[in-house]
Image (cartoon, helix red, strand yellow):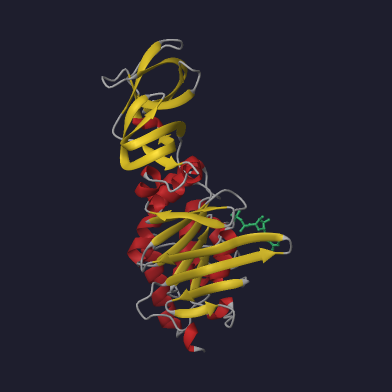
Amino acid sequence: MALSELVSPVMNPLEIVHLSKSYPNTPVLRDVSLSVRAGQIMALLGPSGCGKTTTLRLIAGFEFPDSGTVAINGQVVASAAVRIPAEERRVGMVFQEYALFPHLSVADNIAFGLKGSKGEKLGRVMEMLKLVALPDVGERMTYELSGGQQQRIALARALAPQPDILLLDEPFSNLDVALRGQMRVEVRSILKQAGITCVFVTHDQEEALSLADEVAVMLSGRVAQVATPQRLYHHPATPEVAAFVGESNFLPGVAHGETVECILGRLPLDNSAYGSVTILIRPEWLQLNAQNSQAHASIAWREFYGHDQRIGIRLVDGTPLVVRSTAEADYAVGESVGVGIRGTVQVFLDE
Ligand code: ADP
């Protein structure tokens, strides 16, 4: 291997640098760079067709990049000069449909990729079954398990050979909505106990925000932002990221340092800025009939959820905004209200 292919010894378990990939007439990935620290869970989040699965397949070794580098635990596995095949990479994979072997017992499924004596394999299988909190199902066939249990066995099988990285492709898409929330908590706890470095693909922002330590938002084959879930939501890098992650109101404005002037009045900024801007206001940053109200609106519609509600308002010039409010607030459609801001707003400089 050329010296230039060796990477610094203190590098992260996964380093992707300037990766590009096209299919005939279809550019799919453009200059994608990502790094995942040891034991961290990274979500690749983006709309359908943005290149998430292709990125996962390049990490796994099912595809090779046109340019750029993939390094796993300090070893380059894909570059202009290196093409290490999938079976020689220490990468575990959990597929959307789990891909468990129906003719094998749960224990044999987990033992499938293991090397060593029968006793060593059995020990590892028992350890994995304990990790996924299903210590007694080893003798069962996989079709005798519920969807959630099958997912845990798929995790156990992928983790058993102690891969350097675990990849999960839309891991919750096969589960019904009620089970998904519960499985997110369980899967995160299993991954953290195992201490494994993970990358998972999802188009579901709630899944990404609740499961991942860091989220990479992909839009049109590029990484638009990598951030913690909190930072991504409160400080999206671009209006496009803001629009994709969470609900957003956008208003035009002019920034004067610590404040921005717009149809809602003069609002405080979280970062100083100057000039023509687009203002991001999350629905829960708006307050109706607050003391700091500088503008007026009328109630256009309400959507009551029980724990809270969304309220559509229309400003005097007709601009529609969405407000998220506590469940107690009681407004009638057509009612006139004052509109204020809780805390600060974020702005994006216009081109
Ligand atoms: P995502 O996982 O974000 O939905 P993919 O990575 O699966 O996106 O696909 C990104 C783009 O690449 C899509 O436009 C898709 O049609 C195209 N694509 C994926 N695989 C192939 C392939 N084998 N041949 C041609 N085009 C492909």
Asked if residue 190 can be seen in this view, the reply is yes
Judge whether 84 appears above or below 294 on screen: below
Specify the quarter for ligand 1: bottom right
How many circles with numbers are drawn on the protein? Answer: 0
Query: In the figure, 120 relative to 145: above or below?
Result: below
Taking depth in this image into account, of 105 and 183 the one nearest to the observer is: 183
Answer left or right for 61 relative to 186: right
Residue under the image location 49 percent in, 65 percent down: 33
- Image coordinates for residue 184, horizontal then vertical, percent: 42, 51
Q: Is residue 145 visible?
A: no
Compared across the picture, whether 66 is left or right of 333 comes to right
Residue 215, percent from left and from top: 43, 54
Which residue occupies the extreme right position in the image? 24
Q: Position of residue 349 (x, y in %)?
A: 44, 42
Q: Does residue 239 lie above or below 193 as drawn? A: above
In this view of the protein, which residue sits in the foreground, 194 or 156?
Answer: 194
Residue placed most toward the observer, 209 or 80? 80
Q: Quadrant of residue 21?
A: bottom right
Q: Residue at x 46, y 32 (%)?
A: 252
Question: Is 188 on the left or on the right of 167, as rendered?
Answer: left
Q: Point out residue 341 in the picture as x, y percentages from the top left corner.
A: 32, 28
Residue name at image x 31 percent, y 17 percent: 289
Which image quadrant for residue 308? top left
Residue visible at 31% across and 35% down in the picture: 344
